[in-house]
Image (spheres, rainbow, N blue to C red):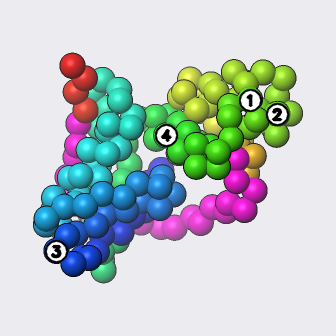
Amino acid sequence: MRFSGKVFKDGDYWLAEIPILDIMTQGHTEEESYNMVLDAIISLINKEDFTVDLYKGKKGSFEVSSPDSKSMISLLLQRKRENSGLSLAQVAARLGFTSRNSYARYERGKTMPTLGKLDELLRAVDPSIDFVINDSNALTKTCTGQGKLG
């Protein structure tokens, strides 16, 4: 699974954003902005030896992914819930769960949801959200960021 982003020049800086994760960073160069977005994801995941790959596309498009899909999905769920202003208990209640821990296990990366369950979890946080499936075979991997705790 990959999350799409875009990079663009704004004044003296290059901005890189991944809208679905609500992440935006900047750099003095385009390459620096790519590295900053990788660092942002690594910092948010905060997991030993976590890696994230960046795939450049055309016209400022790019995608990020990781061999650790659970962590990427958990980041997505956490960011969406936090941006909606909902607590774990509120999301669990919307899903009909009796305990907030039932939802939290997805957000903590303990359980990997199926595509259908992911759709259900995201809609509990943001009913207006919709998935767009896109073929991204034309993109090429250009860099990898790796997290080190310590």
> Does the residue at mark 1 contact the one at mark 3 (Cβ under 8 Å)?
no
Foreground disc of the pair 1, 4: 1
Which percent across, then down, holds residue 141? 25, 57
Q: Which amino acid, mark 1? A: Ala
Label 3 to label 2: alpha-carbon separation: 46 Å
Residue at 28 percent of width and 48 percent of height: 38
Could you tell me which secondary element the residue under label 3 belongs to?
A: loop
**Residue 100 seen anywhere in this rendered image of the structure:** yes
**Residue 54, magenta (yes or no):** no
Density class for disc 4 (Cα within 10 Å; few <14, some 14-19, many ≥20) is many
Q: Position of residue 62 (x, y in %)?
A: 33, 65
138 or 36, which is in the foreground? 36
Q: How crowded is mark 3: few (under 14 residues within 10 Å), some or many (20 or more)?
A: few
Q: Which of marks 4 and 2 is in front?
A: 2
Q: Earlier in the sequence, mark 3 or mark 2?
A: 3
What are the residue bounds of the magenta stretch? 125-146
Does the segment drawn in magenta span residue 126?
yes
- Location of mark 3 (residue): 12
Kind of residue at disc 3: Asp
Label 3, label 4: how far apart the Cα atoms are:
30 Å
